[in-house]
Amino acid sequence: QYVKWDPNQTTCAPVRKLLAKAETGTDAVASSLESLFHGRLKFGTAGLRARFGPGYNQMNDLTVIQTAQGLAKYLMETTDAKAGGVVIGYDHR
């Protein structure tokens, strides 16, 4: 699903290449894929922080999109966000 959902070709292309190589069944390729997709980024006191790269455990467009969607869903369920509104900002230093 990652390659279907990730809108950024910079982070999607390496995953496509690994998936194509995965047909050979080498342990190195399987290990590389596992390292990209094992676990998710954790939201801490400094927000989300990670290296930029492909996969669910690195910072990329898809992890930002999914985090914003999750935060919006949470706020809609736990606050009066529809009436008061919500502002989501970012700092990409």
Image (tube, grey):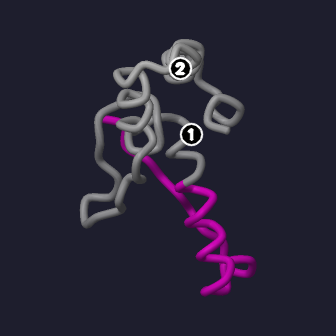
**Residue 82 appears at what percent x and percent y?**
74, 77
Q: Is residue 75 above or below residue 17?
A: below
Direction left: furthest residue: 45
Q: Is residue 11 above or below residue 71?
A: above
- Residue drawn at x 61%, y 86% is 78
Q: Is residue 12 above or below residue 39?
A: above
Helix, strand or loop at disc 1? helix
Q: Is residue 46 left or right of residue 53?
A: left
What is the distance, in whole Å, between disc 2 and disc 1 at their CAs? 22 Å
Q: Nearer the viewer, mark 2 or mark 1?
A: 2
Mark 2 residue crowding within 10 angstroms, few (<14) / some (14–19) / many (20+):
some
- Residue drawn at x 44%, y 31% is 33
Q: Is residue 62 left or right of residue 42?
A: right
Q: Quadrant of the C terminus?
A: top left
- Residue corresponding to mark 2: 22
Residue 88 is a magenta residue? yes
Residue 11 is a magenta residue? no
**Residue 16 appears at what percent x and percent y?**
58, 18
**Residue 68 appears at what percent x and percent y?**
57, 56
Q: Quadrant of the N terminus?
A: top right
